[in-house]
Amino acid sequence: MNGSTFGNIFRLTTFGESHGPALGGVIDGCPAGLAISEAAIQKELDARRPGRDGLDGLASTARREPDVAKILSGVFEGVSTGAPIGFCIENTSQRSTDYAPLAHVFRPGHADISWHMKYDGHRDYRGGGRASARETVSRVVGGAIAQQLLAVHGVRLQAFTVELGGIPVRPPFMVAEETLPFFAPNEDILPEWEETVRAARAAGDTLGGVVQVEAYGVPCGLGEPVFGKLDAMIAGAFMGVGAVKGVEIGAGFAAARMTGSRNNDPLTPKGFASNNAGGILGGVSTGAPIVARAAIKPIPSIALPQETIDENGEACTISIGGRHDCSAIPRVVPVLKAMLALVLADALLMQKRMA
Amino acid sequence: MNGSTFGNIFRLTTFGESHGPALGGVIDGCPAGLAISEAAIQKELDARRPGRDGLDGLASTARREPDVAKILSGVFEGVSTGAPIGFCIENTSQRSTDYAPLAHVFRPGHADISWHMKYDGHRDYRGGGRASARETVSRVVGGAIAQQLLAVHGVRLQAFTVELGGIPVRPPFMVAEETLPFFAPNEDILPEWEETVRAARAAGDTLGGVVQVEAYGVPCGLGEPVFGKLDAMIAGAFMGVGAVKGVEIGAGFAAARMTGSRNNDPLTPKGFASNNAGGILGGVSTGAPIVARAAIKPIPSIALPQETIDENGEACTISIGGRHDCSAIPRVVPVLKAMLALVLADALLMQKRMA
Amino acid sequence: MNGSTFGNIFRLTTFGESHGPALGGVIDGCPAGLAISEAAIQKELDARRPGRDGLDGLASTARREPDVAKILSGVFEGVSTGAPIGFCIENTSQRSTDYAPLAHVFRPGHADISWHMKYDGHRDYRGGGRASARETVSRVVGGAIAQQLLAVHGVRLQAFTVELGGIPVRPPFMVAEETLPFFAPNEDILPEWEETVRAARAAGDTLGGVVQVEAYGVPCGLGEPVFGKLDAMIAGAFMGVGAVKGVEIGAGFAAARMTGSRNNDPLTPKGFASNNAGGILGGVSTGAPIVARAAIKPIPSIALPQETIDENGEACTISIGGRHDCSAIPRVVPVLKAMLALVLADALLMQKRMA
Amino acid sequence: MNGSTFGNIFRLTTFGESHGPALGGVIDGCPAGLAISEAAIQKELDARRPGRDGLDGLASTARREPDVAKILSGVFEGVSTGAPIGFCIENTSQRSTDYAPLAHVFRPGHADISWHMKYDGHRDYRGGGRASARETVSRVVGGAIAQQLLAVHGVRLQAFTVELGGIPVRPPFMVAEETLPFFAPNEDILPEWEETVRAARAAGDTLGGVVQVEAYGVPCGLGEPVFGKLDAMIAGAFMGVGAVKGVEIGAGFAAARMTGSRNNDPLTPKGFASNNAGGILGGVSTGAPIVARAAIKPIPSIALPQETIDENGEACTISIGGRHDCSAIPRVVPVLKAMLALVLADALLMQKRMA
């Protein structure tokens, strides 16, 4: 409840700052007997790394680290034992001196001011410290193991970008591979997105977008009424990721503009005839695919000069150099997938006890 | 974690079904020494009751109940003692026979099928049972007491409808009173909204909309990184309310379409120059007003005939009579306000321990 | 975590004071499909009532109330639905005027001073308010439903007194019936115990004792290492009951005086050859009977004059009249049984999710 | 709730096995601004190490490791930041081959059989894996930081052995130093205890004992009624430590044999005239010293031959060699002190929010 733990039964606790010795976490509640693939964990970590957008890191930070998760406990001879799985990822590319000028200035759009106030001025300002998006490496490790558990139960996840810099992608969505730049769901959109990223970067500015995450094969019955509904858990999980400012399930905000007769998904002996509900009714999974989206704000670290204040409340101007992404997309995509995996793994184990 | 409890320190546990003897709950963690106004609780409950839309209940169910919360413990001589506050609201207007025809049919857009599967066919089908929006009376009681606690700390909440049936309201928002039909923020929009509701009802159909909730005077520092962020808690709280399919904080999805230079809120010695962040940075309150919105789907109970299946998986057709709202708006408005109050009261007490 | 909720999955939240309108609670996480016997609940409540010691209430308070639990939700047509089970027990025999003289004096051995300090002087002094042993009615209701769940899984509990006023009972323990006065495990001890109770009461004094609770048929594997061990949960559950000052599992303190060769329970193909472990090894149930004991201090409300202080810190003398038990035994016996049932039901559901 | 996390606000999550790469944990909820002394952490870790009994390790395992905790996050320039404090302790002295013969045999008195059943046969049998007392290094680190937080609030803890091998120590207890062998509270008892340990070891047998832990300066008001009482938390914390089979608060089981007039602690304007309550009334601290005791069973690993069974249920005989302690005392003493510190730090932060 202090904020470093996620989930009830499949439960991830994380630690670590951008420029400390290491990040890591503990997964408690992973059932015994699950084969743990370190390669599968690494694949997810690699998907989150910079320079993976097919544009020579056009949209991403120049910080390059191997990001290897070392498992410290809970796995014996390649199989989970039911004991907590401890892991850590060492920081190897800290260039903390970049941040010295920012030690006493609040960067607009960042957590600097709110965390400074919350913690009475005690903060590791280097790279945002705990507030850095770097904390998401631990989420990705947890999500990778969650996905391995889900796979055993026939659940498969995918995630892709549906909008970047205000430019939405058009169907069809062919996303099984997750190999395209920006985690785009098809190739047609790429030229437009590349162009808008280049323009933003040239202008010293940054971009946002929208990410969609889907889960197939989710059994009916997951989610705990009334406060632990599956969609509530997903919404909290997504909104807690750094740059997210909005969350939708199924038709989302579009549902607010439909009539009931259009929005209701008819039931047929073969299943639902549509999926405006996004696979969840009354907070409980229906067996239809789970569909969730997150609105990603533009990265607040921009090269353009900004008005702000320092710790003494004095006005000043900053231009943020350093190694920064132009957009949280594509790197946030595997993070959101990890969060959905964590929610579903937890809900699955919660529901299993009822059987 | 089973879903009937919300919050960590200021903690609400609820129970009750639409057609059972009573609904109610327990508020644990309310500090001792808070003057508890039963009149203020009643005011919130009345705001949630049907027939309060200024249209003779045009948008609302014909079920009329006094909805009086009886406090059973935790308050002595009008003041909280620190002991848990138990309360209950009796059901007095059950007309369960309305629901007998629905006992074995799954209503589209409702929790019937997913809860049926989750609970192995054990469900109180009368009025949706625990899945009914009637459960929100307990949320409103909890939220009313949370608001009293927040008021002592200088925090004030307001909630209003910003869109109904696809028709958005135009500024200015003058909402301090919360007395207009549909909890509209100004009178100009009323004729349009009334017209669209009349048309939908005449067509046997239903409508959705968007609700905005705001909090003023929230101190800086609320919210627990990284999984217990204030916006994550709000998103989970809102999405867990029956008909909600989307949540936004501050600029929300619009932020995804802005550049960083436009979306960032400049800091000045006098405060933030804008509030795209909705009062939250890095998951922690900044002192600026909290602004959150929820997308409300149209009520799934429609008079028009719908294709569906029964418990045996056989196709059938239903037209839903009974006493149903045409839109969850306006009744969901005080419920969302209650949820924001619960989140903030809990976050406030979490933060106080750090002082 | 505020103290009014017990358990993780099978979870009881309680409320209520000695002299308020009602006590009650919410059981969340009871699986759907469990037949709920109100008669079985009543039987446990009756076992806790005064006047059940076969001595015309010799050891017990003169307060007589029917103590009927009214179920408000979560049960439909006699079967649990998976929704939270709300219940309440009305207070009908409050004689609050008895307590007016005690409003500003701290009774030795009671919670008066510590709760007064904790809650800044806000307390319902009538009968101890929330600190009264009367709060245990809600535990007993929760425990009764837990026992019904356990019975379905082949687990049976029994509880009996093994020591009263310093006089231990001698074997054999024949306790299946739980019908003897003081919940004695055989009739031979009764004359001695009756005599010591009569003497204490005549002297205006009170007595303590030791209670043993056992569970048979507990499956192997319950309990969560390392902080959620089954014995840790039992110890916390027992020590949280009003008058308990010590807890033992299996051989308990006697184990501290044995050598390893004597204390170890040999394993044989037919099971354990002894049960010094009390059915738990490494915090996890072994399948052998669970055996736990609680040391009960003498009731602190004594007729003899005592030195104490008032809220102003001034010395004064009190003699406590009113309707008080001479010993928490026998009434605490069903309460401790309820607590073991709650622990086991929760541990059982925790373990089921792993299957 | 899976067992690897302890506490609500000051919250420790641990991981690690006896023979894995490392043990460690995460402390979440430590307030920002606390000076963290690594030397003080090391002092507690050293107190737990073998060979510290003044008898050349007479009572302790021959396994010798430096046991250095490396802090990975949450501390910046020597001061806590409010971010989670991750730490790990590397295993450097694994001699796993010692355990190969035990891979498929259940050692009496150990967790082997119960954990084997719980986890469907998946277990790291080397040195007991997660069930090894080695997991307590993480508790000691957490407790050391808790003690630093408590010290700021004027709370001081001490722990000592009051009984070993059935031989109780006689007053006076002069324990401020914690430097004597066995953490004895005075030197007079040492010859007797040394003699009994030598005899047990010569016989291939092991011993138990009783440990007392005390806290001074605890403010009034800690503990959350009714299930989160301070004594309940202590009982659960102690009973969850490996070899503990009994827990007492204050007079403990002796209270069960007193009359109320003797057991009640009179209140005077200068404080309590006695401390049978052990500093807790109604589950809430009174300001008097907290006094708690734990009964420690003899180490189950004995050199003497024992009857047992293997994983196939076949009878067999084992004699346990390897590097084992003769008694959990003295090494369990700092572990119990750590647990009391964790309970008090958590209760202190819980209570602070009420101020």
Image (cartoon, coloured by chain):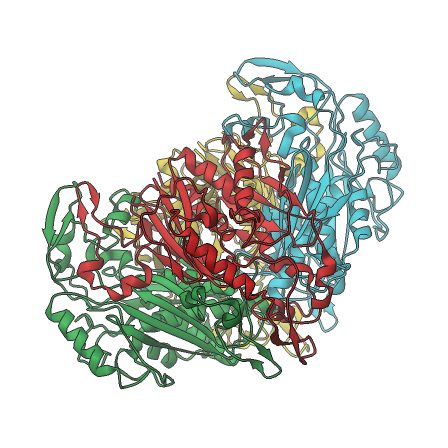
Chain colours: A red, B green, C yellow, D cyan
All told, the count of numbered labels is 0
Residue at x-position 81% and y-position 30%: D197
- Where is B263 relative to C13, above or below? below
Q: Position of residue A3 (x, y in %)?
A: 56, 57
Residue D114 located left or right of residue A89: left
Check the image and report above or below for D202 versus B296: above
Q: Nearer the viewer, residue D242 or B142?
A: B142
Query: In which quadrant will I find the C terminus of chain C?
Result: top left
- In screen coordinates, is C12 left or right of D132? left
- Residue D315: x, y in percent? 57, 13
Q: x and y percent of residue D354 in the render?
A: 58, 70
Q: Is residue C314 visible?
A: yes
B159 vs A92, nearest the viewer: A92
Q: Is residue A259 above or below residue C290?
A: below
Say whether residue D250 is visible. no
Give the image location of residue C235, x and y in percent.
57, 45
Q: In front: C21, or D122?
A: D122
Q: Residue at x 55, y 32 (%)?
A: A81
Kindly identify the residue that appears in the image at 33 percent across and 41 percent down. Answer: A219
Q: Where, by quadrant of the figure, is residue A83 drawn?
A: top right
- Residue C65 is drawn in which quadrant? bottom left
